[in-house]
Image: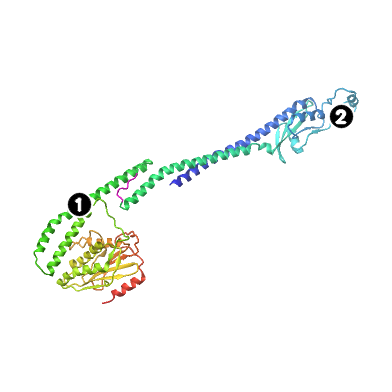
Amino acid sequence: MRWALVKVCVAVTTMVVVAFAVPLGLVIREMARDRAFSNAEREAAAIAPALSITTDRAELERVVASAASDAGMAVHIPAGGGSGDSGGSGTTDAADATGDAGGSGAKQQAVDIGRQRAADKDIATTRKLGRASTTEVPGGSTLLQPVALSSGAIAVVEVYVPEAEVSNGLGTAWAVLAGVGVALIVGSVAVADRLGVRMVRPAQRLVESAHELGEGKLGARVPEEGPTELRLAAVAFNSMADQVVQLLANERELAADLSHRLRTPLTVLRLNAASLGDGPAAEQTRAAVAQLEREVDTIIRTARDAKPKTAAIGVGVGCDAAEVVRERMDFWSALAEDEGRKVRVAGVDRPVRIPVARADLVAALDALLGNVFRHTAEGTAFAVDVHNGEDAVIVLVSDAGPGIADPQAAMARGRGSGADGSTGLGLDIVSRLAESTGGDVRIGRSVLGGTEVRIWIQLDGREPERRGHRGSVRRRRPAALVSTFNRSRSLP
């Protein structure tokens, strides 16, 4: 926006400067030409009184020499243009010449004083028309001024006007106009830049605050400054941020309140579990109640925390997926044995480090295995496979149940099949776990004949990609890992 304003101001100012400077320069050129020819007319007019008195060559040469500023004047007197009086002083030499010149009545010859530059045709035309004219000659122009003699003949005074005199001062005038134009353009650029800064800086602050708010920095606010529109946008943004903070606070309070309400039934359940006596089932029940109570306490503490927590993958964050799978399968195997389910675990014989917190992976596995027990009949077999690659780990949970008719609906948060009261939150927990590493979750048909939930966990720490809906991302998978994974699926 800043450079756009500068470009617009440069374009507008340039057009204005050109629109005024070009006509003004042309006017100045015409004024210089008029000045030069006006001077020439004054010089020609200075010869007219002398021509009306005498046509003597010597006298006229002296007048021309005194009237002209340089050798640019000439006088053309036609033949027979004299008065019969040669303009002498009445000496005996003049008296002796009367028999040859005036006394005999012979006509006087044409007289040309100075250097002639104009063509004879132009001089004759000026003498015939009786009015001044200009004509182009090499190096400039000439002014032809007719003057009436006492004898009635017409003499022509020729004044040479060089081109340098016509253009005298034009260079300076054009330089001044160009300097003024450049100064106007530079000034407009400076003004536009200041206006652009005044508009761009508030917009940049608004963008930066929006990014900070998106990153979880709920204290980001925008100064209410700049043009009216940007001030209104800042007010709206700050109001939205305040409302987001308030909504999150209300959500945390609600989560803490709802979790706290679970304490009473948990206390009753713990007392009842304590009275079950000894045995594997009783021990499993008491362990499950203790774990549930710990999870509820964790939810309450997290919800009461004033600072929102954001998932981060970095140094020190991670767990051994193989160890977690073995632990959770030991827990669920007791229940599977009671229900007559066959269980298979593969790929957990060696450590598999993943950039996921242990509690998150436990929650995801419990959600998937709980769905197997909840949505399949007793005696349905299930399996958990871990496939370790160079830059990704696949955790595969499959069963021999009826499968999921609409995987896309099952992946949507808060939407389940409806018939069994499922909310879809379990799959959402699993999906968020995978997406936090840049991976994803897929639902398909397993080799056992039922549902297959595949969790793809990236190991390179890349940022999660944008998705139109959960599970819709298509990513280029490492060829070696995909090949190994496909071969393992075909094993009995």
Look at label 1 and name its amino acid.
Answer: Leu
| Category of crowding for the residue at label 2, using alpha-carbon neighbours closer than 10 angstroms: few (below 14), some (14–19), many (at least 20) | few
The residue closer to the viewer here, 386 or 182, is 386
The residue closer to the viewer here, 94 or 2, is 2
Look at label 2 and name its amino acid.
Answer: Ala
Task: Decide which of tag 2 and tag 1 comes sooner along the chain.
Answer: 2
Residue 287 lies in the magenta-colored region:
no
Q: Residue at x 26, y 48 (%)?
A: 245
Residue 25: % across, % down: 59, 38
The residue closer to the viewer here, 109 or 113, is 113
Q: Is residue 327 above or below residue 50?
A: below
Q: Which residue is identified by label 1?
A: 254
Q: What is the magenta segment's predominant secondary structure?
A: loop
Q: Secondary structure at mark 1?
A: helix
Residue 219 lies in the magenta-colored region:
yes
Q: Which quadrant would residue 66 be assigned to in this image?
A: top right
- Observer-side mark, 2 or 1, equals 1
Task: Using the rendered image of the protein, determine whether residue 443 is visible from the camera's viewpoint.
Answer: no
Q: Which stretch appears magenta?
A: 217-222
Image quadrant where one finds the C terminus = bottom left
Residue 211: % across, % down: 34, 51
Q: Is residue 320 left or right of residue 112?
A: left
Q: Is residue 276 left or right of residue 248?
A: left
Q: Is residue 358 left or right of residue 290?
A: right
Q: Is residue 319 left or right of residue 12?
A: left
Q: Which mark is residue 481?
A: none
Residue 379: % across, % down: 17, 73
Outermost top residue:
90
Disc 2 and disc 1: Cα gap in Å?
A: 136 Å
Q: Which residue is identified by label 2?
A: 106
